[in-house]
Image (cartoon, rainbow, N blue to C red):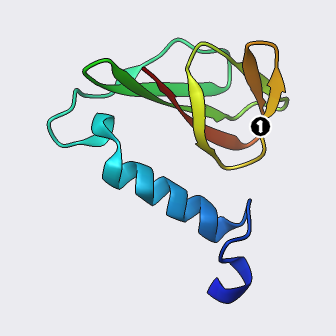
Amino acid sequence: SVDAQSGVPGSTLELYRAALRIRRDHPALAVDAGGVTWLESGPDVLAFSRTAGETVLTCVVNLSGAPVLIDGYGQPLVASDTLTEQGPGHLLPVDAAAWLERR
């Protein structure tokens, strides 16, 4: 229920709230922003971005059977699962997605 998930980090409700906030407020998702750019990524990893001026918003989805290192995409804004810091980047868990921003 909303009462049980409201304000709880990692809950589905808070993930959706964060994603909707990014969709509403992020300049790279504005109507007049550039189109989607598909990015080179490892096997079983989907990555794409949108750009507005100097700001790049990237979505990375891990469809593989092991965590993948996501570095060079920027700072995480929201993720569907907990990211683990590793060196200059983060490990994205299996069956998870992350939205990152680079300015």
Image quadrant occupied by the N terminus: bottom right
Counting from the top left corner in percent of width and height, residue 93 is at 79, 37
Task: Judge from the rendering whether residue 56 lies leftward or rightward of residue 70; answer left or right.
Answer: left
Counting from the top left corner in percent of width and height, residue 62 is at 69, 33
Quadrant of residue 50 within the rendered picture: top left
Task: Judge from the rendering whether residue 4 lies leftward or rightward of residue 77; answer left or right.
Answer: right
Name the residue: 39% across, 24% down. 56
In the image, farthest residue toward the left: 32
Give the amino acid type for the residue marked by disc 1 in the picture: Leu
Quadrant of residue 36 within the rendered picture: top left
Name the residue: 61% across, 34% down. 76
Vertical position of residue 93 compared to residue 14: above or below: above
Task: Judge from the rendering whether residue 56 lies leftward or rightward of residue 99; answer left or right.
Answer: left
Total marks in image: 1
The crowd level at tag 1 (other Cα within 10 Å; few <14, some 14-19, many 20+) is many
Name the residue: 63% across, 84% down. 2
Tell me the element at label 1: loop
Name the residue: 67% across, 72% down. 7
Q: Which residue is mark 1?
A: 83
Counting from the top left corner in percent of width and height, residue 59 is at 51, 33
Vertical position of residue 100 compared to residue 72: above or below: below
Vertical position of residue 16 compared to residue 33: above or below: below
Image quadrant occupied by the C terminus: top left
Vertical position of residue 78 compared to residue 33: above or below: below
